[in-house]
Image (spheres, helix red, strand yellow):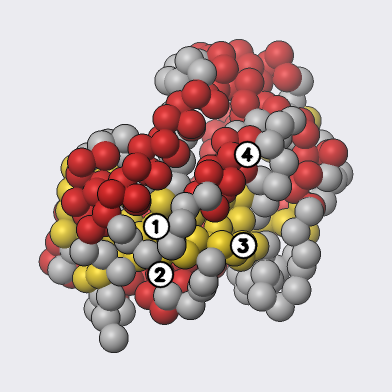
Amino acid sequence: MKKKIVILGATGTIGSKISENLLHDGHQVTLIARHTEKLEKYRSLGAEIISADITDVETLTSAFKNADSAFVLVPDNVKAENTRAYQRQVTGRLLEAIEKSTIKYIVNMSSVGSHMHEGNGMMGGTGEQEVRLNQLEAVNVLHIRSAYFMENFLRTIGLVKKMGFNGTVADGDHSIPMVATKDVAKIAANHLANLDFKGKSVHAVMGPKDYTYREFTSIIGKAINNPDLPYVQIPVEQATQAFLSNGFTEDFANNLIEMGTAIKSGFMNYQKRDHSTTTPTTAEDFVKEVYFPAYNKQ
């Protein structure tokens, strides 16, 4: 039976892929994003497209009202002067819209590491959103705790090309779960369509195995014909200046950096790996199918 499903952040890395999965399966999908130009291609597949900010309670309430399920998240805001305050505002508006609409099924985009509420940068906000959504009565909420996105390596292609090394502020030798976003989107789309969760629950999505940044960089190096491509842990001060020069606020940059530097503490390795949390796309698959084509385009 086809469902009515609302997707917030529909232009994002995850939201766009969830939208494609659901539309191709014939569901009645409403896509909400602040800038909708990239969504026009979905109109021919039957999507309803709404331009709205994620804090627009009236629009969200209206969209949720007749929906079977909805995908929600806290989007990044690189201009936020106080990242946690912004995250709390978004969560508060989402809660208001969910309660007013009486929608019964919510899939929330969270992250591994969200079991902690401090010392983990951006995940402090996703962890808090989990807790607040869990306080909703008569609403079934499933939190997708995703591993580190393999797509994050696309952001350092310029560094690899210009400087001859890959790097972030994270320790290069601490292994963490990493996942391709297409695998996360498939699982989220299935939950949204099947309504197969009750109460409040967590589904961790952890990729095929744990990788170190150095190991992943080596896989990239082999694909781009640079088998000796090194991974360099970038000093915090240098990373901060790079973020600020790209227009990020100091607070947002600090949250990103805390998330990266805290990885060595093990907070990203909390979730249990089993059949339900392991997904198929390997680093080698991702680099071949996604990274290498993107590398050649830049």
Label 2 to label 4: alpha-carbon separation: 23 Å
Helix, strand or loop at disc 3? Answer: strand
Residue pictured at 37% horizontal, 64% vertical? 104
Residue under pointer 4: 123
Find out whether the residues at labels 2 and 4 contact each other: C-beta distance under 8 Å.
no
Residue pictured at 48% horizontal, 32% vertical? 87
Label 4 to label 1: alpha-carbon separation: 18 Å
Mark 1 crowd level (few <14, some 14–19, many ≥20, 10 Å Cα) = many
Residue 156, how many percent across, how many down? 59, 37
Residue under pointer 3: 202
Label 1 to label 2: alpha-carbon separation: 7 Å
Label 2 to label 3: alpha-carbon separation: 14 Å
Residue under pointer 2: 192
Task: Please state which amino acid type lies under the numbered disc 2.
Answer: Leu
Find out whether the residues at labels 4 and 1 contact each other: C-beta distance under 8 Å.
no
Helix, strand or loop at disc 4? Answer: helix
Residue 165: which numbered mark, if any? Answer: none
Residue 230, how many percent across, how many down? 78, 39
Task: Please state which amino acid type lies under the numbered disc 1.
Answer: Phe
Q: Quadrant of the N terminus?
A: bottom left
Residue 75, how many percent across, how many down? 44, 39
Q: Counting residues from the N terminus, which is met first, the one under dot 2 or under dot 4?
A: 4
Residue under pointer 1: 71
Q: Counting residues from the N terminus, which is met first, the one under dot 1 or under dot 2?
A: 1
Q: Is residue 42 visible?
A: no
Q: Counting residues from the N terminus, which is met first, the one under dot 3 or under dot 4?
A: 4
